[in-house]
Image (tube, rainbow, N blue to C red):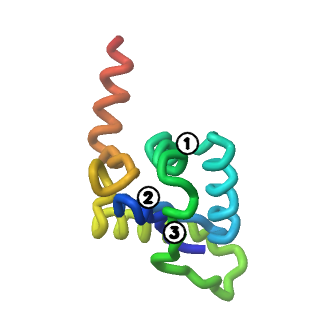
Amino acid sequence: MGVFQIRNTANNKIYVGSSTDLNAIFNRTRFQLFAGAHPNKGLEADWKLFGTGKFEFEILEEIFPREDVNYDYIADLDTLEDLWLEKLQPYGEKGYNERRRSREERLQMIAANRKQ
């Protein structure tokens, strides 16, 4: 488990994500991209445009299992992913990720929707 990136070597754009199973997420992502069913349409469009040979799947940081088999790694993965997103800034011309809304922005959206 850990944080990964998918790098487009043709334009150096990257996509950053995290998973509790890195092998599975790489396989699932490839399948989704080949099938035209990936949720990130910008990444999918470039996959089709440049071809599979122009993409590299890389592990940025791994988390190794603890002795406590009931430990929930999701918070750790979210924090690590946020740190890598902050470091790499894979947005706009640099990448395929969308900026996450802050807690305050999400609360404002909820309040605005309730007024309607």
Compare marks 1 and 3 and give the one earlier in the sequence. 1
Which residue is labeled 3 in the image? Answer: 56
Check whether the beta carbons of the residues at disc 2 and disc 1 lie within 8 A of each other.
no
Mark-to-mark CA distance, 1 and 3: 18 Å
Q: Specify the farthest residue to the top.
A: 116
Residue identifier under label 1: 39
First along the sequence among labels 2 and 1: 2
**Direction from residue 18 to residue 115 in the image, left or right:** left
- The answer for how far apart the CA atoms under marks 2 and 3 are is 10 Å
Tag shown at residue 111:
none
Of 51 and 59, nearer the camera is: 51
Report helix, strand or loop for mark 2. strand
Residue at 31%, 22% (x, y): give it: 112
Q: In this rendering, which labeled residue sits more in front, label 1 or label 3?
A: 3
What residue is drawn where x is 57% and y is 58%?
52
Q: Residue at x 54, y 46 (%)?
A: 48
Q: Badge 3 local density, few (<14 within 10 Å), some, or many (20+)?
A: few
**Tag 1–tag 3 contact (CB < 8 Å):** no
> What secondary structure is found at the residue carrying circle 1?
loop
